[in-house]
Image (tube, rainbow, N blue to C red):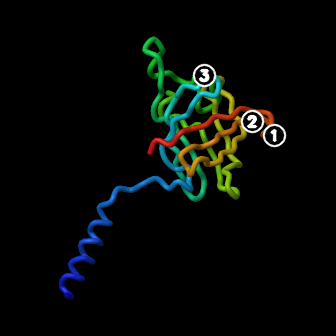
Amino acid sequence: MRPFIFAALIGAAFGAATLPAFADNASPVGLWKNIDDKTGKPKAEIRISEANGVLQGRIEKLFRAPDQEQNPVCDKCEGADKGKPLIGLNIINGMKKDGDEFNGGTILDPENGKVYKSKMKLADDGKKLDVRGYIGVPMLGRSQTWVRQE
């Protein structure tokens, strides 16, 4: 009986070690598809990462029509981001957890080159991310819902 129990425990340990890693639905870290609040269509995939409790997000993929530039640059951005390719561009910076929200950071809109204050909140058990960019107070801004991809 003892060898069977030991074999079962060893098998369970190796089985657990080979399970795939799943996204933490309590954190926005991961890959997200942003949905345009004006058209309802996907625009890009953004990878959100975290270092020392601070979130940042960069564009990994663009959803563009065949007749559009497939590798555009941020020609309306200012400073160090001006002229940088959109793919790989950091658009979320400095976000920190604050209760059930993430705020205190900024979001860049590459279409107009403007940087806005931002806040984010997970929704639908972590499958969606409500992202708001605003000037001054959150009432003066735009919201998008992003959908978790992984």
Of mark 3 and mark 1, the one earlier in the sequence is: 3
List the single residue furthest toward the bottom: 2
Identify the image quadrant of the C terminus: top left
Identify the image quadrant of the N terminus: bottom left
Judge from the rendering whether residue 30 lies leftward or rightward of residue 78; answer left or right: left
Location of residue 66 in the rendering, given as x and y in whole percent from the top left corner: 43, 14
Q: Secondary structure at mark 2?
A: strand
Q: Residues within 10 Å of mark 1 (few under 14, many from 20)?
A: few
| Residue contact at pointers 2 and 1, CB within 8 angstroms | yes
- Report the residue at 48% width, 27% height from top: 62
Q: Residues within 10 Å of mark 3 (few under 14, many from 20)?
A: few
User: Where does label 2 land, which residue?
Assistant: 134
- Report the residue at 61% width, 37% height from top: 145
User: Where does label 3 land, which residue?
Assistant: 39
Comparing 116 with 12, the one in front is: 12
User: Where does label 1 land, which residue?
Assistant: 137
